[in-house]
Amino acid sequence: MKLPFEPRDVENRLDLTQQGFPPAALAVGVWLHYREDRCYEYAALLSYYGFFSLFPLLLVLVTVLGVVLRDNSGLRQHVAAQLSSVQSVLDGLLVDRPRRNILRRPK
């Protein structure tokens, strides 16, 4: 099927239009560089390999802590208290703050 216009002509017209409008030029420029640099692929790779490298590292860390702290109950309780304080801070940042923002939004 023959198009009534060449796709390249439409692309050139859109390019000229967005160049005359600075916010659109910025958005298009950012998108083109994002696509050109393949950032979406690198973001996926980073999250994939980050998860699969950090999760085993945490397992090793917990195992080593379990072996080292097996006989020292005072130090084990100190480590557990420190970890629970970190958990409460993370809960405040990751759970409470987004919940407050959702509840504050006008409907």
Image: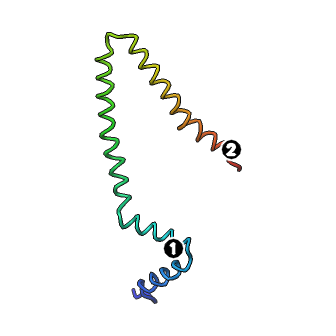
Gap between marks 1 and 2 measured at Cα: 34 Å
Front residue (pair 96, 81)? 81
**What residue does disc 2 label?**
104
- Mark identifier at residue 3: none
**What residue does disc 1 label?**
25
* Amino acid under disc 2: Arg
Q: Position of residue 3 (x, y in %)?
A: 43, 87
Q: Position of residue 73 (x, y in %)?
A: 38, 10
Query: Along the polypeptide, which appears first: circle 1 or circle 2?
Result: 1
Front residue (pair 105, 66)? 66
- Helix, strand or loop at disc 2? helix
Residue 34 occupies quadrant? bottom left
* Amino acid under disc 1: Ala
Q: Is residue 78 above or below residue 94?
A: above
Q: Is residue 53 above or below residue 14?
A: above
Q: Position of residue 28 (x, y in %)?
A: 48, 71
Residue drawn at x 46%, y 70% as measured from the top left:
29
Q: Is residue 106 left or right of residue 14?
A: right
- How has the structure been colored for display? rainbow
